[in-house]
Amino acid sequence: MSIFDEFERFMRRWQKFFEEIERQVEEDLRRFAAQPEAGGGKPRYYYYGFEITMGPDGKPVVREFGNVRQRPDVERVEIMDEIDPLTDIVEENDKIKVVIDMPGVEKEDIKVYVSEDGKTLTIDAKGKDRKYHKEIRLPAAVDPNKAKATYKNGVLSVELEKVEKKKRGFEIRID
């Protein structure tokens, strides 16, 4: 067998591989288009992505974002009205910074809330054709009175100051 024959076999295998991928994508698109409408009408967009990071135990952590969800109980996807935006949480010594990708809305459309206990951050936004919702369990309690938020070029940045850890009870002086 010549090198040209081997190359030809190799190319046929790759062609079959890509034909199979194309077939699967077309099948998924057909299934996608046949979905029942969510919330009274199909969204004008499908927003999906995932992020892979390394967890503290050295194992990869996959986080999905967007408005497309695979339902575990059935073999179909669900299109949500609200987008679960891509979110990064950076914890520093005395601060927590949350960065959220939210293009397509105006600053006035965004509402940011911190729970009473200072441990949950909730973001809601409703623009002309996009809605975002994200509830984030913070790694530490924060002081909502010292929170700062900015929105620029479709990116919301929220900077939160951690609450100082209180000592357990009161210290007793030793005589």
Image (spheres, grey):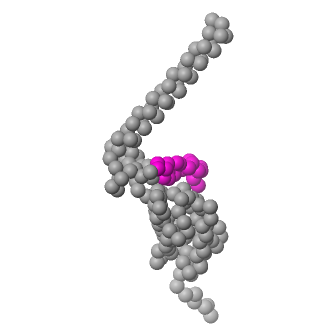
**Which image quarter is the N terminus in?**
top right
Q: Is residue 1 magenta?
A: no
Q: Which segment did they paint magenta?
A: 45-66
- Is residue 121 visible to the viewer in this orientation of the structure? no
Q: Is residue 59 magenta?
A: yes
Which residue occupies 55% across, 68% down? 107
Q: Residue furthest top?
A: 1
Using the image, determine if residue 131 lies above or below residue 12: below
Q: Residue furthest bottom?
A: 175
Which residue occupies 56% across, 81% down? 145
- Front-most of 144 and 166? 144
Image coordinates of residue 72 in percent, x first then y, are 37, 46
Using the image, determine if residue 133 lies above or below residue 28: below
- Front-most of 100 and 119? 100
Image coordinates of residue 25 in percent, x first then y, are 46, 34
Which residue occupies 60% across, 62% down? 155
Q: How many marks?
A: 0
The secondary structure making up most of the magenta span is strand
Using the image, determine if residue 76 lies above or below residue 136: above
- Is residue 43 visible to the viewer in this orientation of the structure? yes
